[in-house]
Image (cartoon, grey):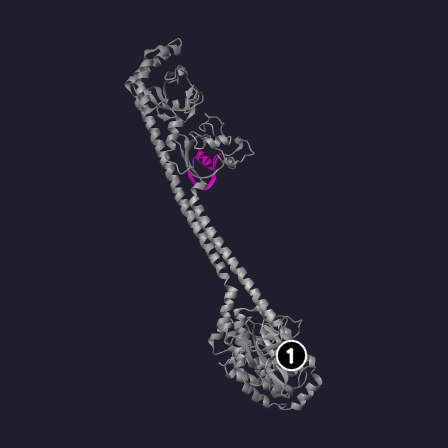
């Protein structure tokens, strides 16, 4: 394929790869960081979801493991305490001495005095002393069936019965079940872990029934435990991190063990701010609604706060794990596992602050969002840079246009504007030849538009027929302005001709059609199909002293039927052409049009020249398409209201056949048929000269877009009020 050389000072053609690549990087480079950022975001969110799930699974497992370890340790300790009480209660000496004291308690007189001086009291104390010392108990009591205390390390309890805090666990022991009580406030003066002696110090007991020789329960033996030391220590054996803790609570949500955060609770006024204050038996496990350790102060009274989520679930009898997080009794978000122990009538919870539990995930999130932020900033920087470069290039192009100089071409006034570009009158700097110069629209420069622009030039430059517009040159300026130079036509397009002066005589129609057949015969011979034959793309001109010289314009929609490489420039099955002049197959199967489709359009142009109207019209584009596919055209003579040469009319109607096979086989055959028409040859050079001398106003000829050979849409060439007459491309 021969391509005209570029003008001096410009880049030589062909230039598709370089132009496309440059514009791809100019217009598309910024997309890739955004795409990468988007992909990273999707991958990041997916990974975050997977990591979250993995950490939650791991955290769930760890919480359950810690809880089970603490619960199992607690059960072992509880069973051990019950076993100690059972073993002591079954001692023969304990049974004997207890029986004696039970009898003393039944004697008349002062029970306390009687018990105090009874020999069995001292003997029982001596008998139980080894067990108390060995197991670290801080006291003991022995009660009869009526829960009256007959022996105790604390003398103040002698003779007392139905003591608050004692009744429940003693009732179980007297019923035959070894038991460990819940912690409860002491009724007597006891020394707490700080060394202060006071009433209300947390205490708890393990107790077992005392059986006589007949196997009957005659009383119960109990040992006093220190819950703030023993019970709490067992629950703190296994706990996670800096904020993990395990604690016990009763059905009312009262804390039965000691909190790890007593200092925080004092500062938040959840317990009294005194040295001897403890959370055990003082703190109800309720949600304050906010983090009190961070200064939050609830608006509601403490009694109106709800139980924490885990406590509420446990007292309802449910075991569970929460890794999503909830607020604990400090209002701090935590994760937890919990279990209710029905045999002991209390629950156990293992908790850890959510912030600590998810610290590894927070690090991952920080790294991810940092990288994503850097990538987003990079994408934004590249985007802004490309915008700036693009604007600078556009500015350079505009300045070049203002300077009226494109390489060796000097621009004069603008004479036309089409869908793809602008046309200027100009001349070559050295040849001084008047030229029409078509510039690709600076604002619409894309790789696709450049490729299509150059395709139009390459295809048109292959054609040498005198009735096809001639291409002189094409190229690209340093400012990336793409252009091509073509012959400057002094004429008018057929659409303007008919609309300005009405239908043409048969002889002139034949004269014009014959020249068009010559142009199309050459194009079809090279395997090129125009696909947009219409009055606006055909000009009659004055050339070299000749008049009514026809020029076929705008090969921008040409299809190279034997060149698959052109397929990417127009989508498969895309409608190409102008609705009023499109062949049926161009509507129904546009990817398979051939040369006979151009002949259909040429017949539609002939119909318009003879009658002054289009073959088909309609209220919508779809209706026009339907009529091209299905409707029979009205005979030109009927439309015009006067007789027409039968052969000419038959030839035009044959061109408009729905089936391509029924049309003339070629443009050459059509030209031969036109030559046999009655009026063929009647339009002479003298007739054309006379018409041009008397009827063609100079301003119309020079002012038309088509005078420069520019691409124009039907909407520009036909009724401006008719939106249906639009080029489809």
* Range shown magenta: 307-329
Seen at 55% across and 62% down, the residue is 387
**Mark 1 secondary-structure assignment:** helix
Which of the image's four quarters has the C terminus? bottom right
Seen at 47% across and 51% down, the residue is 370
Seen at 33% across and 29% down, the residue is 79
Q: Is residue 327 above or below residue 383?
A: above
Whether residue 313 is visible? yes
Q: State the residue in front, 219 or 59.
A: 59
Q: Position of residue 364 (x, y in %)?
A: 43, 48
Whether residue 557 is visible? no
Q: State the residue in front, 265 or 213.
A: 265
| Mark 1 nearby-residue class (10 Å; few <14, some 14–19, many ≥20) | many
Q: Residue furthest top?
A: 109
Q: Quadrant of residue 548?
A: bottom right
Q: Determine if the magenta segment contains residue 236.
A: no
**In this figure, which residue is indicated by the disc labeled 1?**
495
Q: Is residue 340 above or below residue 640?
A: above
Q: Position of residue 532 (x, y in %)?
A: 57, 77
Q: Determine if the magenta segment contains residue 316.
A: yes
Q: Is residue 692 above or below residue 368?
A: below
Q: Position of residue 51 (x, y in %)?
A: 42, 49
């Amino acid at each position: 394929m021969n391509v005209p050389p570029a003008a001096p000072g410009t880049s030589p053609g062909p230039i598709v790869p370089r132009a496309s690549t440059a514009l791809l990087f100019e217009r598309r480079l910024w997309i890739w960081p955004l795409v990468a950022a988007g992909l990273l975001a999707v991958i990041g969110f997916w990974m975050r979801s997977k990591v979250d799930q993995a950490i939650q699974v791991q955290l769930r497992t760890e919480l359950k493991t810690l809880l089970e370890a603490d619960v199992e340790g607690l059960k072992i300790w509880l069973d051990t305490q019950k076993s100690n009480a059972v073993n002591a209660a079954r001692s023969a000496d304990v049974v004997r001495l207890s029986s004696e004291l039970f009898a003393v308690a039944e004697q008349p007189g002062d029970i306390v005095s009687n018990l105090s001086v009874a020999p069995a009291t001292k003997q029982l104390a001596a008998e139980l002393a080894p067990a108390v010392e060995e197991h670290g108990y801080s006291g003991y009591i022995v009660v009869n069936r009526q829960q009256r205390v007959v022996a105790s390390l604390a003398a103040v309890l002698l003779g007392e019965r139905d003591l608050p805090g004692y009744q429940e666990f003693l009732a179980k022991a007297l019923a035959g079940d070894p038991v460990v009580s819940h912690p409860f406030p002491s009724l007597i003066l006891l020394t707490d872990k700080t060394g202060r002696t006071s009433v209300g110090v947390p205490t708890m007991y393990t107790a077992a029934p005392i059986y006589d020789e007949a196997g009957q329960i005659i009383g119960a033996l109990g040992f006093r435990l220190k819950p703030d030391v023993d019970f709490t220590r067992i629950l703190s054996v296994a706990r996670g991190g800096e904020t993990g803790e395990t604690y016990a609570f009763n059905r009312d949500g009262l804390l039965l063990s000691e909190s790890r955060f007593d200092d925080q609770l004092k500062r938040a006024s959840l317990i009294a701010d005194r040295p001897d204050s403890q959370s055990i038996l003082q703190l109800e496990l309720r949600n304050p609604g906010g983090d009190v350790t961070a200064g939050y102060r609830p608006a509601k009274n403490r009694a109106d706060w709800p139980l924490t989520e885990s406590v509420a679930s446990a007292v309802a009898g449910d075991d569970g794990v929460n890794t999503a997080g909830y607020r604990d009794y400090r209002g701090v978000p935590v994760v937890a596992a919990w279990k209710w122990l029905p045999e002991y009538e209390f629950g156990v919870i293992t908790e850890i602050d959510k912030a600590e539990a998810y610290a590894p995930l927070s690090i991952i999130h920080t790294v991810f969002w940092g990288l994503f932020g850097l990538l987003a900033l990079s994408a934004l920087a590249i985007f802004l840079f490309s915008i700036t470069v693009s604007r600078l290039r556009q500015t350079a192009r505009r300045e070049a246009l203002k300077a009226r100089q494109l390489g060796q071409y000097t621009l004069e006034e603008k004479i036309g504007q089409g869908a793809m570009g602008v046309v200027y009158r100009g001349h070559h700097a050295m040849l001084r030849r008047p030229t029409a110069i078509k510039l690709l629209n600076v604002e619409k420069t894309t790789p696709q538009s450049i490729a299509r622009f150059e395709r139009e030039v390459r295809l048109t430059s292959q054609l040498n027929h005198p009735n096809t517009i001639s291409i002189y040159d094409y190229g690209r300026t340093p400012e990336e302005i793409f252009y091509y130079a073509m012959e400057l036509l002094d004429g008018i397009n057929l659409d303007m001709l008919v609309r300005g002066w009405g239908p043409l005589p048969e002889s002139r129609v034949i004269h014009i059609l014959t020249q068009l057949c010559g142009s199309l015969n050459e194009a079809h011979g090279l395997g090129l199909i125009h696909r947009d034959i219409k009055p606006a793309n055909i000009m009659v001109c004055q050339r070299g002293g000749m008049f009514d010289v026809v020029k076929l314009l705008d090969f921008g929609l040409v299809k190279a039927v034997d060149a698959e490489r052109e397929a990417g420039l127009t989508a498969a099955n895309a409608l190409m052409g102008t609705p009023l002049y499109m062949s049926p197959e161009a509507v129904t199967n546009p990817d398979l049009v051939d040369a006979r489709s151009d002949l259909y359009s040429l017949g539609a142009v002939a119909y318009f020249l003879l009658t002054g109207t289009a073959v088909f019209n309609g209220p919508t584009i779809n209706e026009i398409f339907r009529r091209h596919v299905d409707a029979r055209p009205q005979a030109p003579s009927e439309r015009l209201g006067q007789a027409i040469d039968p052969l000419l009319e038959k030839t035009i109607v044959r061109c408009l056949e729905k089936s391509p096979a029924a049309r003339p086989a070629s443009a050459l055959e059509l030209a031969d048929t036109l030559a046999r028409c009655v009026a063929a040859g009647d339009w002479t050079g003298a007739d054309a000269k006379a018409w041009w001398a008397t009827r063609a106003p100079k301003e119309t000829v020079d002012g038309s877009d088509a005078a420069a050979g520019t691409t124009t849409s039907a909407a520009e060439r036909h009724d401006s009020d008719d939106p249906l007459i639009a080029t489809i491309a």
